[in-house]
């Protein structure tokens, strides 16, 4: 029996296997509104064999977008554009669809990666960014505006509004983006948070805003639907946010009912030194799971079926998420199932692709061709 292809329940959501398609920005929206690229991308990966697909960082207000091409869910137009995409997913796939809700904070107003990824100045299509403190990422860059009480309230409410829209769209789960140097992580990390009020300084104070956002979102998501959080488990910078603080944050989230921790890392400082290698972040999912008892998702350079199987079977994480491997091989889940003796659902249009040596891959399928 494959551990990777065993079921798991997150609150009221039952998943047939332990694989999630990691959220991946597509930089292809118009004013936050999904385009035909999103239709292609989301519907393609809804057939990947992963039990859960997580929609890319979906921004809760326009100035919270990383790039002008980033997806949003802050207007009726944003909501309307996602509707037919999800309708098609539901018609052809039984994958659960999660959505990552995000605000980029001081990392907003940036060029698309393929346009260089740099901060776009005001007047050149960029906009004024906001953050916990007026500290730019690089000293040479324009500083963000430090959020005041009204700004934080607006953003909390924006998360709630987007979560409500997501629920109207029938999204199965919410993942809050608390990682990669975006707004919530900026509050957590002492590198980006230099506030002297009750939102800065001590760990308790730095956790306050992300916990408020979590509470606000949780309060509008129905009780049977899970809410998870992606965290940066460390800044990979001496004196920055680290695993010990991440564990305290996760304990506070657990007390509030969090359903999973998606354990990523980095993103707040250009000084970060990341020891990249296969499964380099699995250690964080393992430690968080052990210290908090929360379900964890391991992510980062997990590419092989046996590697994923070992992570779940040995109890290092409850699930695994893959990003780039799914872009490269949009049927990664099928191939992993074939290798590990698991089963995936495939649409009948594709049943004839089942290899003759893998008769159980798609479960019970009949195909009467004349
Ligand atoms: C094109 C691309 C877009 C990404 N966008 C997001 C995103 O929207 N939200 C997020 O949390 N991580 C994002 N990531 C990070 C991935 O979700 C994942 O954590 C990372 O790529 C490491 O996993 P991998 O080695 O399996 O790709 C992105 C990665 C890629 C390659």
Image: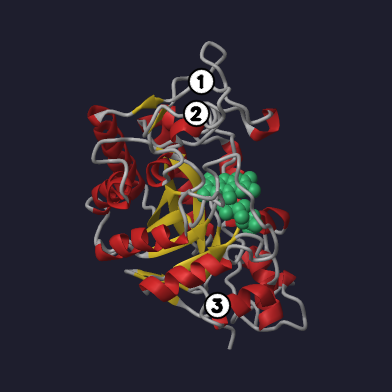
Q: Position of residue 295 (x, y in %)?
A: 41, 71
Instruction: Provide the residue designation for mark 2.
Output: 136
- Residue lying farthest to the top in this orientation: 123
Report the mark closest to the observer, 3 or 2.
2
Percent position (x, y) of residue 28?
59, 34
Gap in angstroms between the C-alphas marked 1 and 2: 6 Å
Q: Quadrant of residue 174?
A: bottom left
Which of disc 2 and disc 1 is earlier in sequence?
A: 2
How many C-alpha atoms fall within 10 Å of the one at disc 2: few (<14), some, or many (≥20)? some
User: Compared with residue 234, is residue 117 higher up or lower down, i.e. above or below?
Assistant: above
Q: Label 1 belongs to which residue? A: 142
Question: Can residue 12 be seen by looking at this rendering?
Answer: yes
For mark 3, give the secondary structure.
helix
CA distance for labels 3 and 2: 39 Å
> What residue is disc 3 on?
312
Coloring scheme of the render?
A: secondary structure
* CA neighbours of label 3 inside 10 A, class few (<14), some (14 to 19), many (20+): many
Residue 123 x/y as whole percent: 53, 10
The answer to whether the residue bearing label 3 lies less than 8 angstroms from the nearest atom of ligand 1 is: no
């Amino acid at each position: 029996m494959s551990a990777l292809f065993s079921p798991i329940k997150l609150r009221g959501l039952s998943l047939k296997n332990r694989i999630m398609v990691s959220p991946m920005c597509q930089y292809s929206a118009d004013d936050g509104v999904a385009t035909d690229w999103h239709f292609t991308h989301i519907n393609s990966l809804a057939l990947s064999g992963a039990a859960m697909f997580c929609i890319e960082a979906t921004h809760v207000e326009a100035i919270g977008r990383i790039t002008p091409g980033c997806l949003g869910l802050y207007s009726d137009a944003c909501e309307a554009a996602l509707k037919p995409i999800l309708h098609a997913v539901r018609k052809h796939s039984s994958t659960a669809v999660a959505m990552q809700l995000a605000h980029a904070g001081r990392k907003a107003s940036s060029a698309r990666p393929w346009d260089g990824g740099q901060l776009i100045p005001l007047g050149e299509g960029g906009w004024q960014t906001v953050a916990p403190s007026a500290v730019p990422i690089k000293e040479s860059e324009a500083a963000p505006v430090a959020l005041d009480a009204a700004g934080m309230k607006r953003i909390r409410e924006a998360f709630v509004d987007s979560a409500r829209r997501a629920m109207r769209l029938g999204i199965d789960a919410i993942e809050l983006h608390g990682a990669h140097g975006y707004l919530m992580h900026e509050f957590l990390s002492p590198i980006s948070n230099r506030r002297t009020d009750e939102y800065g300084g001590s760990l308790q104070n730095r956790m306050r805003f992300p916990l408020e956002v979590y509470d606000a979102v949780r309060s509008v998501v129905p009780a049977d639907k899970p809410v998870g959080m992606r965290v940066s488990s460390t800044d990979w910078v001496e004196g920055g946010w680290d695993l010990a603080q991440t564990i305290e944050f996760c304990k506070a989230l657990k007390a509030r009912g969090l359903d999973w921790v998606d354990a990523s890392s980095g993103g707040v400082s250009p000084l970060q030194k990341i020891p990249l290698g296969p499964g380099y972040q699995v250690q964080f999912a393992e430690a968080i799971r052990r210290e908090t008892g929360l379900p964890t998702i391991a992510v980062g350079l997990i590419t092989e079926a046996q590697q994923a199987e070992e992570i779940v079977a040995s109890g290092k994480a409850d699930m695994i998420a893959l990003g780039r491997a799914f872009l490269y091989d949009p049927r990664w889940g099928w191939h992993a199932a074939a290798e590990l003796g698991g089963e995936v659902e495939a649409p009948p249009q594709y049943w004839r692709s089942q290899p003759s040596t893998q008769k159980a891959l798609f479960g019970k399928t009949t195909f009467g061709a004349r």
